Structure formats: structure tokens, C-alpha cells
Image: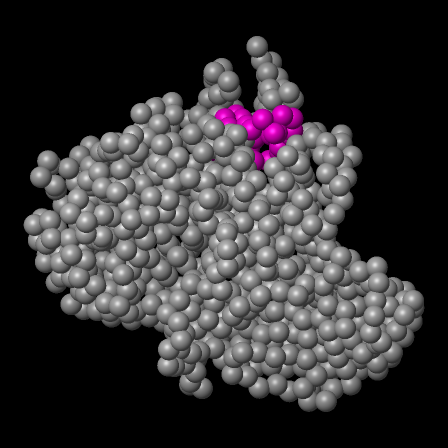
């Protein structure tokens, strides 16, 4: 039985009596400086990124700006004859000539995406004597501040680092417990073309990015990096020091501090990027003027004023969600040693599991606050001029996985960079839809970049169709528009922004699909992301028709569009056509082994344990397959996951944890969550793939190499184990693992505009608090019990189970 009361919104009380714990759940800390990128502590304000090594004799900080990419606005009409090959490919597929279809599909390829660039490196050279003790380096997730402390020659030194969103500045404070003891120099270096100067005690660096960078996976090739002084995004980096005493000198290339008691370093960065369709040279922003303005404004503030505004702004977002799994007996260790200890499955560290979850939320706050420029494959942190997979937007899972937790983890504002980027893609994508597929609406392929590139990649025939020719990127991305609405119920957003973009993506699907011999709507040609089939006669290929993932994504988008039309009271001929097509989409098929088929026919995969599980899109992140409503399909999805096994790359494991949670198997999801946190050695700073997926010492996800999507997918999965929802139903603790037998969570979000908090003990739900964003009804479902809930705007209900 339950008891319920409706009361005005008040402060939640779940976390007033948290148990004392040995291990922190909101601090990463280490007892030595970082040697490799994958050991650094990262900071960001959604635009500026910094990777702090924390060295004593010489510290270095990799600097990034999320708008700093190679390239320039794209020409979306870069293969004007591509669409003429579509009928030929379809004819080859009709004749079951898959080899010919594969070869013809190469003519439907275009340029590669551009790459996310490293802006430069700040070096802080300590001129004191060598040798130190009592070293500690940490990142406090509560405040988004990193600190380094150590003792040298009997003097205690401290450095504090943060990147402020409200003041658009990075700040570093150097201090010690004895006067006149700081002696250091500051200099800047970059892999870009740049010049450096000093004037008025400001170190100034100005330069530009390449106008083209070849993807790193293409290997060594001539002119892989192309610079031109008349092309490419410009940048300015400015460094200025406020010091209490001692001496500050400049020598043209560095700032030198002598006998200073305290120093505050201000770092301002800006680029000329002015939009995906603006030439960054001729139509770019005045990067130097903006950078100088930000520097001057910050320099007139005290450290405490800047720090206070930074933490207040950050905590508004971060503090919305609290999580506790009860007492942990794990010993207090540096985070890297903590990861190694956690590899022993018999040893618990509940607070490490919470730390990883909250670190994912921290990373999203730090890397996703710039409209039109979402977090990329590495979030905002990249030291390589040819980064892994170009550090681009990979649309066949990775860019979307970055944002799976944006709504559920109560960070809805941080979804906006992706949602506004979809608008950019729709403009270039309308040309892609026409020139590559002879379709209306808009479409996108496998990769994109800051310039909203939408064409299929492959360098005009050099790419394998298994990855180069996939064209459902726009369809998948468009599902995020409805997802955002379903959590916020913002009708203006739905009407003015989301619905027109969804409509364009739907129009592409309607024009692109054809009927199969049985009267089902299918895609042709199609591929299943990065996978290869084997035909009965042994041919290994990629080009096919009616792949399960294509149809699942189209079905999800169409369902969203129908729901949106009802919300907006739209009943036109297009809606009627979409409803009719929805009834005739190719149905799911179960194979001979009980698996959910990936291909139109029940064919084998070249790699049965392939990292992609795109045929399961309808289970997660889609909403078409559930154990309750479609038990046979859910069982087929389970069999598919069993065949694939649990060992896979970082981002793929993040996806599989969510899939197991949707199958209501909390213990299997938890097993894989622990495996996601398996320790991985740093990559020796070369970005080369080495070994299994897991987690690097700084908690970065190891694909390997580093890809941030695994972090975000893992954090999303924690909530998916605790809460699942539709527009009309909310499932409480649907996949709670045995290991989390008690706990509290507050502030997580459910579809329908609700905020949920829960407490459970002995694996049983004790109480639930629900807040309605707008007046709405829903069903709360727990352990077979369904309670109908009706709340007004802002009303708050407490339920005791």
C-alpha cells in the first residue's frame, strides 16, 4: 500500500543524513603529476577546454576551443552525379547481385569531414630547486576546480585552476605559505601556424588552423595537413598575470615571475568561427577584440569574485542530481589505484560507481554550452593535429550517445548545442538529399563536423560502403528533437524548431523508401553501420536493402512525428500519409537462432560479436521493443546480446549497458558497468588503439583510444537502471542490481515533464517524490503496482510505498 500527499515544491530532504564514507564520490585525486593525456584533469566551460598535467618542475596545460576546427564552409553539392547511381544500385540488389551493388555504391560517396584542432599548450616552468613531497592533484566535481599541492624546500605550494562560463576565461592561481617564493615563467606553443609577442605585460599568440586535415585513419599520406595563410579559422590566445609583489618581466616570447608571493594567471582564447556557413577569414568574428575584451573584464575582477561566479553558475547545473548507494567500505586510494582495485569483481566501491556517473554529468557541463557546436568525439579535449577519427561528429551512434543523458540527468539546457546543430545540418542536408539521393527533405551520412557536412564520406569511392555509405544520420539525429520536447513540454520549441526539422527528415524517408515484393516499405540501398554480412554463397558485403536499423530509426522518427502532430493538432495530408506508411513498414524478423535479424535475410555476420548493435535501436535508444509490450522481440534482442557477448569497446559497452537495463536485467547491466570501469593504461600520448575498452586513469572512456561517448553512455545507463519512462508511464527501479540494495537519488527526469527522487532499502522502494513541470497525468509503476498520478503546474507529490 502507498500513502500520497500533494504539497508545494520544497527542498528535498533525501540527502540530509548521508552516511560517512571512506572514499569520495565527487573528487578525482592522484599522488603524482600526469605523464600522459589520459591522466590529465580536464576543465571546460562549454567552449574553452583545458587538460591540466599538474607538473611541479614544469606544468603544461593543453588548451582547446570547441569552435577551432580545420576546414571552411562545405560545398554540399560536391558529387552532382551521385543520385544517378541509385537506380543502378537498386537494380543490382533486385537481381541479388550484391558485389555489383557494393561497387556501384562507391560512386555515392563524397568528401571526408574536417578535424577538431588543438589550439596550443601553456607551459609553466618552475624556476625553484628540484625535488618535492606531499604531492596531491585533484579535480573537485562539486566546484569544477582542479588543485595541485606539494611541498618544496620546506614551502607549501598550491595551484588552483578553473574555466569560467560566465566570464569566458581560464584562471590559474599560484600561491604558497611563504612570501616571495614563487619563481616561474609562462610560455605558449602550438602545432598551428602562429606568431607570438608580448606588450603591456600580455603574452599574445595569434595563428590559424589548416584549411584541410586528412583523417588519421587514412595513415601517412602526402599533404595530410594543409595550411594556407589566406584560409582557415583564426585564433587568439592571451595570457596576463596579476601579482601581489615581486617582479614580472617579458622577453618577447614569455612572461617571467620572480620572488612573487601570489600570482593569478588569466587565459583568454577566441577564434574567428562565426557560423557553419561563414568563411572564417572573410566573414569571421574579430577574435582578437573579443579575446582582449574578455581578458580585460576578467582582469578587473578579484580571484574570489571570478571563482564565486564560476562555482555558482556551475552548481546550478551540477547540484540538480544527487546519488547515494549507502555505506562503502572501500579504502581511500588515488583514483588510478582505485580503478585497479575495482577490477577485482569481489571488491565493492559504490562511490567509484557514483563518481563515474557524476563525472559524466561534469563532462557534459564542461563541453556542451556552445550553440550549434555540440560535444565531439573527445568532448572538448584534444591534443592531436590529426586526432582519432578526426574527433568529429560520428552520427551512426557516437554523437547521439553523447546526449543520451542530457534530459534524464537534468541537464536539458546542454542538449541545445546538439539541437541547434541539427538545424545547421538540415540546410546542407537538403542539398545532400537532392544530389545524392534525388529526395526531398534533408539527410546526413556517417560523419559531420563544425561545418555541418552531411554528404556520405569515402573520398569519392575509396571508402568501404559498410561505413561510408550509411545515410540515416539525419533520421537518428532528428529523434533528439522529440526527446527534448518529451521531457520539457515546450510547445513553442516543438512548433517553431523541432517540428519543421522532423518534417524535413520524415520527407526524406518517404521519398527514399520503396516497396519490397511483399508490399513493405524498405530502404534501398541500405547498410548496417560498419558491419558486413555473409551471403549463402559466401560473398561478404555491406550494401543491402531493408536493414533492420534503417527501418527501426525511420519507425522511431515517424512515431515521434505522429505524436508531435497530435500535440500541435496538425491533421494534414502529410500526417495521413505518414500514418499509412507507418502501418506498412517492414516488420522486425526473428532469425533461426532466436536473434533479432540485422539484415533483410537471416544471414550471418562476418563478425558475430561486432561492436555495433544497430539492429537493437528499437530497444534503446528507441521505444519500440519492451519486455512488457513486445516480449518475443525483447527475447530476440536478449539473444542477440548473448551472441555478441559482453567484451567490446568503451562506447559499445556503454550502449549495451542501456540495452540490458531496458531488458530489465539489472545484474547483467551492472556487470557490464563494472567492466566499463576496467582500468586501461594511457595511450603513450599518440592516440593509437591499444588493448581493450574500459577507463583511463583520469576516468576518460577508452574506446580505445579516448572517446567521450562511453562516459556519457555509462552515465545514462545508471539512470536507465533506476528510472525508465514514456510520455504516459514512469517505471521506478526497473533494473535495480543486487549490488545497489539501498540508496537514494534525487533530481532525475522522466518523460512527461516530471522530476523524480527515490529512496530504497533492502532492494525495496521506500518513498518517491515527483514534481510536475506542467499540469499532467502519468502512471507510476513499481514491482507490478500501478498508481495513477495527476499533478498541476509545479505540484509536488510524496509517495510512501
Q: Give the vertical position of 547 relative to 295 (above or below).
A: above
Q: Nearer the viewer, residue 84 or 691?
A: 691
Q: Position of residue 514 (x, y in %)?
A: 14, 45
Q: Position of residue 86 (x, y in %)?
A: 14, 58
Residue 707 makes an appearance in the image: no
Residue at point 46%, 44% (across, down): 647
Q: Position of residue 134 (x, y in %)?
A: 84, 59
Q: Please give the range of residues in magenta.
A: 732-757
Residue lying farthest to the bottom in this orientation: 251
Residue 745: say if magenta: yes
Q: Give the vertical position of 48 relative to 121 (above or below).
A: above
Colour pattern of the rendering: one colour
Q: Give the vertical position of 783 relative to 215 (above or below).
A: above
Residue 225: say if magenta: no
Left or right relative to 359: residue 554: left
Residue at point 71%, 78% (across, down): 186
Res 265 → quadrant:
bottom right
Res 482 → quadrant:
top left
Q: Position of residue 311 (x, y in %)?
A: 70, 53
Quarter of the image that includes the N terminus: top right
Q: Give the vertical position of 746 relative to 342 (above or below).
A: above
Residue at point 43%, 66% (across, down): 390
Residue 329 makes an appearance in the image: yes
Quarter of the image that includes the C terminus: top right
Left or right relative to 158: residue 285: left
Amino acid at each position: 500500500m502507498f500513502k500520497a500527499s500533494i504539497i508545494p515544491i520544497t527542498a528535498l530532504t533525501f540527502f540530509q543524513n548521508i552516511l560517512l564514507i571512506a572514499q569520495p564520490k565527487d573528487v578525482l585525486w592522484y599522488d603524482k603529476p600526469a605523464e600522459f593525456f589520459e591522466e590529465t584533469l580536464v576543465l571546460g566551460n562549454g567552449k574553452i577546454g583545458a587538460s591540466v598535467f599538474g607538473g611541479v618542475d614544469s606544468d603544461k596545460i593543453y588548451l582547446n576551443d570547441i569552435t577551432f576546427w580545420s576546414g571552411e564552409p562545405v560545398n554540399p553539392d560536391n558529387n552532382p552525379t551521385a543520385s544517378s547511381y541509385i537506380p543502378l544500385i537498386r537494380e543490382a540488389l533486385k537481381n541479388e547481385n550484391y558485389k555489383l551493388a557494393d561497387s556501384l555504391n562507391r560512386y555515392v560517396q563524397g568528401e571526408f569531414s574536417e578535424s577538431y584542432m588543438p589550439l596550443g599548450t601553456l607551459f609553466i616552468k618552475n624556476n625553484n630547486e628540484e625535488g618535492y613531497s606531499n604531492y596531491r592533484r585533484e579535480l573537485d566535481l562539486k566546484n569544477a576546480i582542479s588543485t595541485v599541492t606539494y611541498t618544496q624546500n620546506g614551502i607549501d605550494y598550491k595551484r588552483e585552476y578553473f574555466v569560467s562560463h560566465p566570464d569566458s576565461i581560464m584562471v590559474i592561481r599560484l600561491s604558497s605559505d611563504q612570501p616571495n617564493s614563487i619563481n616561474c615563467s609562462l610560455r605558449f606553443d602550438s602545432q598551428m601556424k602562429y606568431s607570438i609577442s608580448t606588450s603591456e605585460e600580455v603574452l599574445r599568440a595569434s595563428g590559424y588552423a589548416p584549411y584541410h586535415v586528412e583523417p588519421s585513419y587514412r595513415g601517412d599520406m602526402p599533404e595530410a595537413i594543409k595550411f594556407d595563410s589566406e584560409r582557415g579559422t583564426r585564433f587568439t590566445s592571451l595570457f596576463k598575470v596579476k601579482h601581489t609583489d615581486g617582479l614580472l618581466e617579458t622577453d618577447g616570447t614569455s612572461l617571467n615571475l620572480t620572488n612573487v608571493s601570489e600570482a593569478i594567471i588569466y587565459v583568454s582564447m577566441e577564434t574567428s568561427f562565426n557560423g557553419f556557413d561563414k568563411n572564417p577569414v572573410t566573414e569571421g568574428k574579430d577574435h582578437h577584440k573579443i579575446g582582449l575584451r574578455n581578458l580585460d573584464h576578467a582582469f578587473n575582477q578579484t580571484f574570489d569574485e571570478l571563482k564565486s561566479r564560476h562555482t555558482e553558475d556551475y552548481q546550478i547545473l551540477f547540484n540538480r542530481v544527487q546519488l547515494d548507494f549507502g555505506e562503502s567500505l572501500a579504502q581511500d586510494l588515488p583514483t588510478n589505484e582505485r580503478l585497479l582495485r575495482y577490477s577485482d569483481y569481489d571488491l565493492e566501491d559504490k562511490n567509484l560507481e557514483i563518481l563515474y556517473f557524476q563525472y559524466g554529468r561534469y563532462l557534459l557541463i564542461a563541453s556542451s554550452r556552445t550553440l550549434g557546436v555540440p560535444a565531439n568525439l573527445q568532448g572538448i579535449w584534444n591534443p592531436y593535429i590529426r586526432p582519432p577519427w578526426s574527433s568529429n561528429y560520428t552520427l551512426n551512434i557516437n554523437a547521439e550517445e553523447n546526449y543520451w543523458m542530457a534530459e534524464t540527468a537534468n541537464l536539458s539546457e546542454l542538449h541545445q548545442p546538439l539541437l541547434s546543430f541539427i538545424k545547421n545540418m538540415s540546410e546542407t542536408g537538403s542539398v545532400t538529399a537532392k544530389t545524392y539521393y534525388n529526395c526531398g527533405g534533408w539527410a546526413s551520412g556517417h560523419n559531420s563536423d563544425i561545418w555541418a557536412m552531411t554528404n556520405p564520406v569515402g573520398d569519392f569511392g575509396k571508402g568501404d560502403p559498410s561505413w561510408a555509405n550509411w545515410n540515416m544520420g539525419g533520421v537518428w539525429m532528428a529523434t533528439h528533437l522529440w526527446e527534448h520536447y518529451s521531457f520539457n513540454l515546450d510547445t513553442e520549441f516543438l512548433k517553431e524548431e523541432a517540428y519543421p526539422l522532423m518534417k524535413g527528415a520524415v520527407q526524406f524517408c518517404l521519398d527514399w523508401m520503396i516497396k519490397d515484393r511483399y508490399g513493405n516499405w524498405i530502404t534501398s540501398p541500405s547498410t548496417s553501420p560498419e558491419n558486413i554480412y555473409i551471403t549463402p554463397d559466401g560473398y561478404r558485403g555491406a550494401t543491402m536493402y531493408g536493414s533492420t536499423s534503417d527501418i527501426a530509426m525511420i519507425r522511431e522518427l515517424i512515431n515521434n512525428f505522429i505524436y508531435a502532430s497530435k500535440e500541435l493538432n496538425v491533421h494534414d495530408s502529410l500526417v495521413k500519409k505518414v500514418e499509412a506508411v507507418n502501418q506498412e513498414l517492414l516488420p522486425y524478423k526473428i532469425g533461426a537462432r532466436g536473434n533479432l535479424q540485422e539484415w533483410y535475410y537471416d544471414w550471418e555476420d562476418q563478425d558475430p560479436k561486432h561492436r555495433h548493435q544497430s539492429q537493437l535501436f528499437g530497444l534503446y535508444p528507441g521505444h519500440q521493443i519492451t519486455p512488457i509490450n513486445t516480449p518475443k522481440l525483447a527475447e530476440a534482442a536478449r539473444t542477440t546480446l548473448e551472441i555478441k557477448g559482453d567484451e567490446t569497446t568503451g562506447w559499445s559497452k556503454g550502449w549495451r549497458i542501456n540495452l540490458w537495463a531496458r531488458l530489465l536485467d539489472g545484474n547483467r547491466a551492472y556487470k557490464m558497468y563494472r567492466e566499463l570501469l576496467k582500468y586501461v593504461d594511457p595511450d603513450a600520448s599518440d592516440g593509437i588503439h591499444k588493448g581493450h575498452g574500459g577507463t583511463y586513469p583520469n576516468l576518460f572512456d577508452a574506446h580505445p583510444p579516448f572517446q567521450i561517448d562511453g562516459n556519457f553512455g555509462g552515465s545514462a545507463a545508471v539512470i536507465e537502471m533506476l528510472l525508465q519512462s514514456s510520455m504516459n508511464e514512469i517505471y521506478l527501479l526497473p533494473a535495480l542490481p543486487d549490488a545497489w540494495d539501498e540508496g537514494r537519488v534525487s533530481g532525475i527526469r522522466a518523460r512527461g515533464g516530471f522530476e523524480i527522487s527515490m529512496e530504497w532499502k533492502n532492494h525495496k522502494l521506500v518513498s518517491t517524490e515527483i514534481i510536475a513541470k506542467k499540469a499532467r497525468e502519468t502512471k507510476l509503476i513499481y514491482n507490478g503496482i500501478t498508481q495513477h498520478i495527476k499533478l498541476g503546474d509545479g505540484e509536488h507529490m510524496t509517495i510512501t510505498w
